[in-house]
Image (cartoon, grey):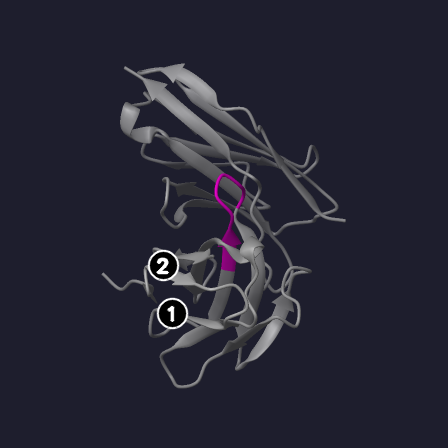
Amino acid sequence: EPEVTQTPSHQVTQMGQEVILRCVPISNHLYFYWYRQILGQKVEFLVSFYNNEISEKSEIFDDQFSVERPDGSNFTLKIRSTKLEDSAMYFCASRVNTEAFFGQGTRLTVV
Amino acid sequence: SQKIEQNSEALNIQEGKTATLTCNYTNYSPAYLQWYRQDPGRGPVFLLLIRENEKEKRKERLKVTFDTTLKQSLFHITASQPADSATYLCAPLSGGYNKLIFGAGTRLAVHP
């Protein structure tokens, strides 16, 4: 069964460093998303991406964040100059119709 | 601004009983409403979608209702099992569906 894959599963980074979280959406999907979930809190929408551009973004998604679809398969989230409060689980999702499929997440720990 | 409200307190029920979870929304006119399940440390998994012109939808032991007048959806799990223990998220969808926003979720614990 097709699935969304995310790498790495766990990333530890020093405060102030840049990280890139990677996602491979399901191949025929057209809409891509990134979400964040701080431990014990809700799943928060960050950004949606369609037709090679950002279609929606939340207040959380400020200049520190960027997304890219560098080729036909990968979808990346870059976090510049990480802060302690960026520590969270980051989920990628994709869809073609209304049902969204989520990856297993990348646990980002900023120390 | 748009709001999605789900019971923040955990719902504890006995195995075999029916669990009922509530999702209320404001400042939305969703064309669809989705329910997802999330297990600890894992991504949400799609369960059911109901359209605005549908009153009720069923899938095996799951039933969803959608009242656009009350701006509310109810999610029922009948004959609940301990394996149903998880957090359940609702997501009203409108417009171009580009902004898939979840409620905070309700944690369900089914006890043997």
Using a 10 Å C-alpha cutoff, classify the residue at mark 1 as few (fewer than 14 neighbours), some (14 to 19) or many (20 or more): many
Please give the name of the residue rendered at 61% of the width and 52% of the height, measured from the top-left corner: B31
Is A27 one of the magenta-colored residues? no
Residue wearing tag 2: A103
User: Does dot 2 land on a helix, a strand or a loop?
Assistant: loop
Please give the name of the residue rendered at 43% of the width and 35% of the height, measured from the top-left corner: B87
Residue A36 vertical position relative to residue A31 in the rendered view, above or below: above
| Circle 1 chain | A
Disc tally is 2
Is residue A102 left or right of B24 when viewed as pictured? left
Is A38 one of the magenta-colored residues? yes
Please give the name of the residue rendered at 33% of the width and 74% of the height, measured from the top-left corner: A27
Q: Quadrant of residue B80?
A: top left
Q: Are marks 1 and 2 in contact (CB under 8 Å)?
A: yes
Q: Which amino acid type is shown beneath numbered disc 2? A: Gly
| Circle 2 chain | A
Using a 10 Å C-alpha cutoff, classify the residue at mark 2 as few (fewer than 14 neighbours), some (14 to 19) or many (20 or more): many
> Toward the viewer: A14 or B88?
A14
Q: For the magenta stretch, what is the residue range?
A: A35-42
Residue wearing tag 1: A23
Residue B100 visible somewhere in the drawing:
no
